[in-house]
Amino acid sequence: MSSPSQSEILLSLISQCPPSWSKKRKGWTSTSPNECTWDGVSCNTDDEITHIDLDNTALVGTIPPTLSLLRSLTHLLLSRNKLYGTVPREISSMSSLTVVDLSYNELRGTVPPWDGASISVVDLAHNQLSDRLPEMRGGVTSFDVRNNRIAGGIPESVTRLKQLERLNLSNNRLTGPLPVNMGDMRSLRELYLSNNRLSGSIPVSLGHEALILEKIALHGNLLTGTIPPSLGNLRELTSLYIDNNRITGSIPNELCDMNLNDALFITGKNHEALLAGDVDILPGRHLTQRNGCNSIACPPSHHSTRAESTGGVFPCVPCDNDEVNPYMGMNSCFATNVLEILRDFYYATDGERWDEDATWAEESVPLCEKKGVDCDEGGSVVGIRLAGLNISGIIPESFGFLSSLEFLDLSDNQLYGNLPVTFKHLPLRTLDVSGNMLTALPPGLCDKMGINGNGRDGAFRCDNLACPAGTVNHLGYFMEGIPCEPCEGYHYIGGKTCPHMNKLSRAEIGGLAFAGVGTIVLLFVFYFQTRQSSSKYYDSVVRGINDGIDLSRYDEINFTSHLSKDIPQEELYNPNRFINYKDDEDETGETEEKDNNPIWLDVPEPVTDAAITRNNSAKKSTGNLRSDLSANSKNSHSSFGALSNSGSVSAAEEVWLDVPRVD
């Protein structure tokens, strides 16, 4: 089958567009000559397509993998259209492609690895891409996937992109710490990681003096710790946005002296008065004067008067008396009023859908009478028990300022996100958040003394609080003798059951079914073989009785062999011969010593007075058993034979004769 032509490949790109799309543009029909003259198409001197530029052209449909057959294509620009589906792997591995812009579409699926030999610029911003970032490699200089739904952590491999100048991962769902070796990215000028759920501290290596960073945007995450003074080594730095994290301490003087973030304070509408400083905005509250420090972040115990989207920076005002804020760069302070904190939790977790009426939103219900709330004698909330109430949502940070809370049980609900950083401020002794969809414990909580016995004997363990992601047990946390067991692919902390243990793949189900059928067949074969062998054995005994064998000699016959072999007639009827087959020898050729204790066999005999008399006589005394049996067997032979020949004996007229045998 021949490869499609260049024009056929181009037409596959618009195959889902309405006919009106082609009518508005030059070319783009099957009868249009020379595709190199079509709108948005450029070719080299060999008439090979090198550029496809259809930005903002109302293009509808999926990206055809056949575009990868354009071996000279260097630029694929399809942004601001209505493309959907996934990004074909064939496109991301094209050796000729240098620039790809698929931003502002409706693409889904994962971000493929861009490992083409020539790739330089990748722009997938403003789509609906999900899952995790791929391992990063190659000579990419600009990588932009902002405003998607990408989760997971930042791969360490990003620090090995030595030519990377611009990295934008903002507005996704990234979690985990920043790579510790970010200082290795010596070509990096712009770093945008804002508005994710990244945690941990800012790496000291990010302030390596050899870096040429100009812009750093880390705002809107869950970063903790303090700002490393090493960032003052970045002489090219003009913008540093670290507000709305959980960073404590103060701005290092080295950074305050750099007059950063001037772009935020360009004179504009209603800003001139603010820039003058010390301007009243509320009675009794005053703005701090703008300086190099609050241009980066408002100090702790203050908050910015700006909207959160514009940063927790100047202008800054102090928190109210009934509020608290231990962090820098915040746009609001935290309430300390317990009723208000509980109300925040209720609404943040869609309280109206809880399985039981918790009365948390009803002001007429006293605090200590609300569902699941325990108070001490002084009326302080010391315990909250809300297990299994179908609570769904993210725990608000204000919950961490319940200053008397010692017991908290939120297990078996549908809470998600990270446990708030503010939990490290709680005086907890018991914590149970198992059975939810939480992704991480806050930094510092694992090192807090006393929670679930943590710190006992000097041992601090995070699994005392919750089984780490990737592990489970039936409690959801470690207890002596009940460790957290591995569960591959389980992404939540505090897991109680492993989904993979409850689900079998098709191959596993097929294997089990095959094994089950095989087992049943083997059981049937064994059953019929046993029936057949037992029948042979029974027939041998009956024949012996019919033919007058001296049963007093049966202790010398190895009846075990009857189960697997047919004993020759002449051997069976020779009472003076000891029967021993080779199968009864062990591997050394020596014959096993047999146990001569008799084992009773029950065989049927016709009901006659003589038979009943003989049977009773055989059971009277074990001391003269053999002589009795010998005599009875001789009489039995003639009596049994006569009755058998007459055909007058029925099955209902049988009794059982006890005969000893030796294995």
Image (cartoon, rainbow, N blue to C red):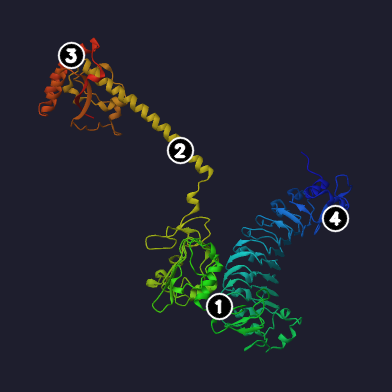
State if disc 1 and disc 4 touch (CB < 8 Å).
no
- Residue type marked 4: Ser
126 with respect to 363 (left or right): right
Q: Helix, strand, or loop for circle 1? A: strand
Q: Mark 4 points at which residue?
A: 42
Q: Which residue is drawn at 53% across and 72% down?
A: 343
Marks 2,3: beta carbons within 8 A? no
In the image, 9 versus 654, the foreground residue is 654
The earlier-in-sequence mark between 2 and 1 is 1
Q: Residue furthest top?
A: 646
Left or right of 217, for residue 542: left
Residue beneath label 1, please?
334
Residue 92 to residue 459: above or below: above
Q: Name the residue under label 2.
A: 515
Residue type at mark 1?
Phe
Label 3 crowding class (10 Å Cα cut-off): few <14, some 14-19, many 20+? some
Q: Which of marks 4 and 3 is nearer the N terminus?
A: 4
Q: Mark 2: which secondary structure?
A: helix
Contact flag, marks 3 and 1 (Cβ < 8 Å): no
Distance from Cα at disc 2 to Cα at disc 3:
53 Å
Q: In the rendered image of this protein, does residue 479 appear above or below residue 334?
A: above
Tell how many labels: 4
| Alpha carbons under labels 3 and 1: distance apart | 107 Å
Amino acid carrying mark 3 in the image: Ser
> Tag on residue 639?
3
Q: What element carries label 4?
A: strand
Q: Upstream in the sequence, badge 2 or badge 4?
A: 4
Taking depth in this image into account, of 275 and 560 the one nearest to the observer is 275
Q: Which of marks 2 and 1 is in front?
A: 1
The C terminus appears in which quarter of the rendering?
A: top left
Q: Tell me if I can see residue 46 in this picture.
A: no
User: Badge 2, how many Cα within 10 Å: few under 14, some, many 20+?
Assistant: few
